[in-house]
C-alpha cells in the first residue's frame, strides 16, 4: 500500500497532464477562495463541467487541488479585508485581521499558510492510515450526539467571542432565530417566510456572512474615510515568521489538525464547527486567554490548521462509506458518478486505483498549494493592500453582491446580503459582536433538526444523559456557560466590599 | 461602398433572422436543476446535458437553483421564456408539492418533453435488526404500531411518500423520521439510529454487498437491474409500487416545432447505448419515452399519489 502510494505520487508528479491540471486547480482555488463571496463549494461547482471530458483520475486530481487551495485562500480575505472568503475562515478574521491592522498582514498570511499545510498533511496522514477506524466512530454519531456537539459549539462560541457576554448571547440568539426561517426540516412547514415564496428556502449562510462581514465592513470603512486614516497599513514587517516562533505554535497546530480531521469526518458537521472548537480550545488552554482577538499568531494557526485538516477528514466518509461529509465532497461524489463510479464501502476492494488516485491527488494539492501560495500567492495578495481603499472597496462590494447571487442563482439572496450588511454595520456601531450571530445561524438549524429527531426516535430528553458522548458534551457545555457566573458570584460573596 | 456595406449587413441579418426561426437551437440552452451540484438530480442532468449538447450542436449549460425542497428551481423553470432555450429535470417530489405547499408550481405551467426513467423505492433494514424477510418486518410493525423508526425525506419527499405508500397499502404505522436527503438517511441506517429506510436501490446497494444492510424488497413492477436477487414487494404478496421518477420538462407554451426538436434529441440521447451504459454504471434506470407517453406516466403517478397524500393528511391545496 505504502509503496503503491509513493509510486502514484511520483507518477502524478512526472505526468505533465496531471501536474498541469493540479497546478491549474491550485491557482484557480487560490483565486476563487480569496475572493470574498466565492466559497469552496461554488469554486468546485464552477469547475464541474470541465471534468466531463476528462478521465476520472485527472478530474479528481484537479478538483482536489481546487478544494484544498480554496480552503487555505479563504483566510486571505479574512486577514486582509476582515471578510471571510469561506465559512471555514469566519474565526480566522478575529486574530488575522487584528494582525493586519498592526501591519503584520503578510506574516498572518504566512502563519495561515503554514498552519493550513500542516493541517492538510495531518488530515492526509490520518485519512491514509486510519480512514476505516475513524469512519466507524463517525457512524456512532447519531442525532443525540449531533445535537450535543452543536450545543457544545454554541457554548464555545459564546465563550470565545470577546467583549460583553450578554451582548454576545443576544447576537447568538438572533442568529438562532435567523436559522428558523424557511421550511422546517422535520415537518416541511414554511416558517417566518412573511408570505413570500422566496424565503421558503431559508436564509443561506453565505449571503448572510457576505452581508454581515463584507458589506458591513465596506460601510464602516466609508464612515471612517473622513478621518483620512488608512485602517489597514501596508504590510511592512517580515513575511515569514521566525523558526523559534513557529516551533512554539506546533502543539496548537497539531491539536487544531486533529480536531479538524475528526470533526470533518462526521457527516454534515463541517468546517465551521471545527474552527470554533479549535479556537476555543486554544483559548481555554492558554495562560493569557485575553490576548486572543488582539492579533496573535496562535489565533490564526488554530482555525487554519483545523479547516484544512477538515479536507482530509471530509474525504473519510466519502472513501469508506460513499457518503458525502459536506456539500464540497458531495460535488466530488458527483464527479465520480458522472464517470460511472459509485463510491461505497466496496471502494477499497473494488477500486484500489481510485483510492490511490485520491490519496495521491490530495498530497499533490497540498504540495502545490504550499509552493504556489508561498512563492506567488502571498506576494500577490499583500499587494492588494496597496490598492487605494475606494477602488478596493468598490470591487469588494461588487464581488459581495455577485457572490450572494451565485450561491443559488437567487435575487432574494442579494437582498439578504444587503439586509445583513445593515445589521452588521449597526452591530459594529453598537459594539455588538457579529460572530455569534453568524454561528447561531449556521448551528441553529443543525441543533433544532437533531434535537427534534432525537425526540422523535427516543421520545425522551433523558437520552442525552444516557449516551456517553452526548452526556460528556452536554455537561461540558453547561459548565462553560454556567461556571463563570457561579465563580463570579462566589468571589463576590467572599469579598462583600 | 457604404451602400454595399449596408446591403451586406441587411443580407446578413436576414440570414441570421431566418436561421433563428428555422434552425432551432441557435444558441446555448440552459438546463435548470432544482437541487445542488453533486446530488442525483444534478448527476442525471449532467449525464444528459453533456450528450444533448453533442446532438443539438449547441452548449447545454447546467445551472443549479437549489432551495425550498426543489421549488425554487421549478419556479425558475416555469417562469422562464417558453422559447425552448430553458429546460430542466422534473422529479416525483414536484408532482407532490402541487398539493402539499403554498404557491406551488402546477404541472400545467410545464411542458413535458421526455421521460428519463423510474427510480423505484425499496425497503432496506440494518444488518443488526431481526428482520430477515419482508414478512418479518410487516409482522413486527403491525405488532408495535408507530414504534419502528424508518429513515426518509421530510414530508413530501420521494422516500417519505414511499414509506406512506407502504403504510397506506399494507395498513402499517411507522415512526417516520425525516432526514435532509438520501445520504444522511443512509448514514442513520448504517449507524443503527433507524431500523429501516425507504430510499432507492442505488443508495444502499454497495452497503448491501458489504453486508451492512439487507434489502427486503423493491417497490416496482419488476426487479431492479442492479439488484436482480432482490424480489419485488408484489412477488412477496404485498402490492406496493412506489418511488421516484425523472422527466425532462420546459415551461408551458414552447412552440410545437421547437418542442419536437428537443424531445427527439432527448429520446435519441436517452436511447443511445453509450448513454445507457454510463447512466446504468452510475445506478440510474433509463426508460426513454416521448412527450405523450411521458405525460401519461406522470398523470398516472399523480392519480396514484393523491389519495395517499390525502390519507396522510398532507394535502393543503386540494385538487
Image: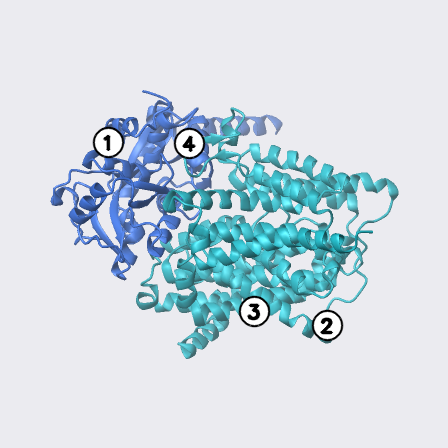
Chain letter belonging to callout 2: A
Expressed as whole percent of the image width and height from the top left, the position of residue A486 reads 67, 52
Question: CB under 8 Å between callouts 1 and 4?
Answer: no
Chain that is blue in the image: B
Q: Secondary structure at mark 1?
A: helix
Distance of label 2 from label 4 (alpha carbons)? 55 Å
Q: Secondary structure at mark 2?
A: helix
Distance of label 3 from label 4 (alpha carbons)? 43 Å
Q: Residue furthest top?
A: B319
Q: Residue at x 32, y 29 (%)?
A: B112
Expressed as whole percent of the image width and height from the top left, the position of residue B11 reads 50, 27
Chain letter belonging to callout 1: B
Comparing marks 2 and 4, which lies closer to the viewer?
A: 2
| Within-10-Å neighbours for mark 4: few <14, some 14–19, many 20+ | many
| Residue under numbered circle 1 | B297
Q: Is residue A258 above or below residue A334?
A: below
Amino acid at each position: 500500500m505504502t509503496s503503491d502510494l509513493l509510486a502514484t505520487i511520483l507518477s502524478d508528479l512526472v505526468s505533465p497532464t496531471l501536474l498541469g491540471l493540479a497546478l491549474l486547480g491550485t491557482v484557480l482555488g487560490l483565486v476563487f477562495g480569496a475572493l470574498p463571496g466565492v466559497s469552496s463549494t461554488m469554486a468546485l461547482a464552477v469547475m464541474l463541467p470541465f471534468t466531463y471530458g476528462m478521465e476520472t483520475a485527472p478530474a479528481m486530481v484537479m478538483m482536489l487541488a481546487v478544494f484544498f487551495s480554496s480552503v487555505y485562500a479563504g483566510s486571505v480575505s479574512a486577514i486582509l479585508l476582515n471578510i471571510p472568503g469561506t465559512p471555514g475562515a469566519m474565526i480566522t478574521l478575529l486574530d488575522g485581521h487584528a494582525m493586519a491592522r498592526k501591519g503584520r498582514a503578510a506574516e498572518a498570511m504566512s502563519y495561515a499558510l503554514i498552519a493550513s499545510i500542516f493541517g492538510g498533511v495531518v488530515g492526509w496522514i490520518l485519512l491514509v492510515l486510519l480512514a476505516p477506524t475513524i469512519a466507524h466512530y463517525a457512524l456512532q454519531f447519531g442525532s443525540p450526539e449531533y445535537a450535543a456537539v452543536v450545543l457544545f459549539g454554541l457554548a464555545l462560541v459564546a465563550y470565545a467571542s470577546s467583549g460583553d457576554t450578554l451582548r454576545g448571547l443576544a447576537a447568538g440568539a438572533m442568529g438562532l432565530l435567523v436559522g428558523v426561517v424557511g421550511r422546517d426540516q422535520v415537518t416541511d412547514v414554511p416558517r417566518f417566510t412573511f408570505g413570500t415564496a422566496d424565503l421558503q428556502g431559508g436564509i443561506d449562510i453565505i449571503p448572510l456572512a457576505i452581508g454581515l462581514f463584507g458589506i458591513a465592513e465596506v460601510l464602516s470603512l466609508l464612515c471612517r474615510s473622513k478621518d483620512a486614516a488608512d485602517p489597514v497599513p501596508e504590510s511592512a514587517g517580515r513575511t515569514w515568521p521566525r523558526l523559534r516562533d513557529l516551533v512554539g505554535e506546533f502543539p496548537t497546530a497539531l491539536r487544531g489538525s486533529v480536531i479538524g480531521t475528526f470533526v470533518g469526518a462526521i457527516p454534515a458537521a463541517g468546517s465551521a464547527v471545527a474552527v470554533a472548537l479549535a479556537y476555543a480550545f486554544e483559548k481555554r488552554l492558554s495562560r493569557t486567554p485575553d490576548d486572543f482577538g488582539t492579533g496573535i499568531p496562535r489565533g490564526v494557526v488554530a482555525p487554519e490548521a483545523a479547516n484544512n485538516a477538515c479536507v482530509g477528514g471530509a474525504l473519510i466518509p466519502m472513501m469508506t462509506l460513499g457518503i458525502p461529509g459536506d456539500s464540497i465532497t458531495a460535488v466530488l461524489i458527483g464527479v465520480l458518478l458522472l464517470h460511472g463510479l459509485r463510491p461505497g464501502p466496496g471502494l477499497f476492494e473494488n477500486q484500489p486505483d481510485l483510492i490511490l488516485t485520491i490519496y495521491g491527488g490530495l498530497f499533490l494539492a497540498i504540495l502545490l498549494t504550499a509552493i504556489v501560495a508561498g512563492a506567488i500567492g502571498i506576494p500577490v495578495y499583500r499587494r492588494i493592500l496597496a490598492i487605494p481603499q475606494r477602488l478596493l472597496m468598490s470591487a469588494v462590494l461588487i464581488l459581495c453582491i455577485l457572490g450572494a447571487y451565485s450561491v443559488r442563482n437567487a435575487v432574494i439572496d442579494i437582498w439578504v446580503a444587503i439586509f445583513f450588511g445593515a445589521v452588521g454595520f449597526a452591530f459594529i456601531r453598537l459594539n455588538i459582536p457579529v460572530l455569534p450571530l453568524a454561528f447561531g445561524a449556521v448551528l441553529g438549524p443543525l441543533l433544532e433538526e437533531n434535537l427534534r429527531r432525537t425526540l422523535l426516535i427516543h421520545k425522551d430528553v433523558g437520552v442525552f444523559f444516557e449516551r456517553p458522548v452526548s452526556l460528556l458534551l452536554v455537561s461540558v457545555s453547561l459548565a462553560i456557560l454556567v461556571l463563570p457566573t457561579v465563580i463570579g458570584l462566589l468571589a463576590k460573596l467572599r469579598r462583600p466590599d | 461602398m457604404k451602400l454595399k456595406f449596408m446591403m451586406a449587413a441587411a443580407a446578413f441579418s436576414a440570414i441570421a433572422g431566418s436561421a433563428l426561426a428555422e434552425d432551432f437551437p441557435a444558441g446555448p440552452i440552459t438546463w435548470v436543476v432544482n437541487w445542488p451540484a453533486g446530488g442525483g438530480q444534478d448527476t442525471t442532468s449532467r449525464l444528459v446535458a453533456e450528450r444533448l449538447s453533442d446532438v443539438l450542436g449547441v452548449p447545454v449549460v447546467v445551472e443549479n437553483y437549489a432551495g425550498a425542497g426543489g421549488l425554487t428551481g421549478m419556479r425558475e423553470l416555469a417562469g422562464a421564456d417558453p422559447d425552448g432555450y430553458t429546460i430542466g429535470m422534473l422529479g416525483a417530489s414536484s408532482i407532490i408539492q402541487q398539493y402539499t405547499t403554498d404557491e406551488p408550481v402546477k404541472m400545467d405551467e410545464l411542458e413535458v418533453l421526455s421521460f428519463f426513467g423510474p427510480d423505484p423505492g425499496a425497503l432496506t433494514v440494518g444488518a443488526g435488526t431481526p428482520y430477515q424477510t419482508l414478512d418479518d418486518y410487516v409482522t413486527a410493525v403491525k405488532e408495535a404500531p408507530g414504534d419502528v423508526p424508518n429513515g426518509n425525506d421530510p414530508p413530501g419527499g420521494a422516500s417519505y411518500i414511499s414509506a406512506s405508500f407502504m403504510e397506506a397499502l399494507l395498513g402499517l404505522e411507522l415512526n417516520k423520521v425525516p432526514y435532509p436527503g438520501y445520504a444522511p438517511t443512509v448514514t442513520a441506517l448504517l449507524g443503527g439510529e433507524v431500523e429501516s429506510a425507504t430510499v432507492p436501490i442505488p443508495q444502499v446497494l454497495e452497503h448491501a454487498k458489504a453486508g451492512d444492510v439487507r434489502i427486503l424488497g423493491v417497490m416496482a413492477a419488476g426487479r431492479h437491474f442492479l439488484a436482480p436477487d432482490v424480489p419485488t414487494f408484489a412477488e412477496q404478496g404485498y402490492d406496493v409500487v412506489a418511488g421516484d421518477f425523472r422527466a425532462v420538462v420546459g415551461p408551458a407554451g414552447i412552440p410545437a416545432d421547437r418542442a419536437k426538436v428537443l424531445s427527439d434529441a432527448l429520446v435519441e440521447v436517452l436511447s443511445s447505448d453509450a448513454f445507457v451504459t454510463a447512466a446504468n454504471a452510475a445506478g440510474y434506470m433509463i426508460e426513454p419515452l416521448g412527450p405523450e407517453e411521458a405525460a401519461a406516466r406522470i398523470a398516472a403517478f399523480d392519480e396514484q399519489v393523491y389519495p395517499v397524500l390525502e390519507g396522510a393528511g398532507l394535502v393543503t391545496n386540494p385538487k
